[in-house]
Amino acid sequence: MLTVFDFWQDFRNFQYTLPIVPGLVIHLEEKKITVHLPRNRYEKVLKVLTNSNEHVLAFGANFSLKADSHLVCMQNDDGQYQTQSINNESATRKITGASFIVFSGALKSSTGLTAKMSIVEDGLLVQIPPNTMSELRNSLKDMKNYAINCGKINETQPEEVIYLSWGEEESHCNLGYDSNYKYFN
């Protein structure tokens, strides 16, 4: 069984790391996945690029207040993990939030695919060719939006499109301890 830990494990230190960029959210809509990158977190994105393996790029996401449902991973009675989507009872499911996205740059041209997206646990795995990984990394470094079409090569309509979009500045995440804050008056 494929598990997300296979993609970012460090066998030397026996650690699992998933860098989280404050304010980054992932939205799944019908055939469109959008990774919203806050402009004021550019330095954090650069740090993820610098510290990641050249073939694997992973981002942990924040809980999205705009999503009406979220992917969750639950363990069933026989120990297997199962992905479900939970949503607000009164809301119709339009936007589903995800907890992470992993880009794996090892997709072979022999697959006949431009890219392949899979839901894994409570996040997404996107398999892309090495040249697409290079283009993705360069766009992030240059702070440019980027789109990845998933599906068969030479198809007129992609199965899904993944957009990495630099957007409005994020200011809702806790940035840490403020020395001016007083616990008692």
Image (spheres, rainbow, N blue to C red):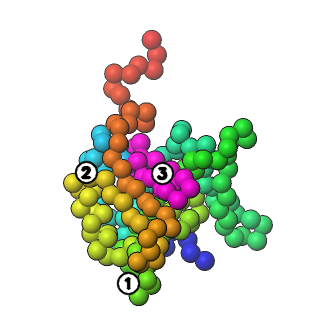
**Kind of residue at badge 3:** Ile
Q: Residue at x 26, y 58 (%)?
A: 139
Q: Residue at x 32, y 70 (%)?
A: 132
Q: Which residue is mark 1?
A: 109
Contact check, label 2 and label 3, Cβ < 8 Å: no
Helix, strand or loop at mark 3: strand
Tag on residue 143?
A: 2
Disc 1 vs disc 2: which is toward the camera?
1
Magenta highlight on residue 34: yes
**Kind of residue at badge 2:** Met
Using the rendered image of the protein, determine whether residue 119 is visible from the camera's viewpoint.
yes
Q: Is residue 38 left or right of residue 77?
A: left
**Kind of residue at badge 1:** Ser
- Of the residues under marks 1 and 3, which one precedes in the sequence? 3
The residue lying toward the viewer, choosing from 160 and 134, is 160
Disc 1 vs disc 3: which is toward the camera?
1
Task: Residue 35: give x, y in percent of width and height.
Answer: 42, 52
Real-space CA distance between mark 1 and mark 3, rounded to the nearest whole angstrom: 27 Å
Compared with 173, 103 (above or below) is below
The residue lying toward the viewer, choosing from 46 and 16, is 46
Q: Which segment is the magenta one? A: 16-36
Task: Residue 82: give x, y in percent of width and height.
Answer: 67, 65
Using the rendered image of the protein, determine whether residue 10 is visible from the camera's viewpoint.
no
- Of the residues under marks 1 and 2, which one precedes in the sequence? 1
Helix, strand or loop at mark 2: loop
> Which residue is the extreme one toward the bottom?
110
Tag on residue 26?
A: 3
Q: Residue at x 34, y 36 (%)?
A: 169
- Of the residues under marks 2 and 3, which one precedes in the sequence? 3
Helix, strand or loop at mark 1: helix
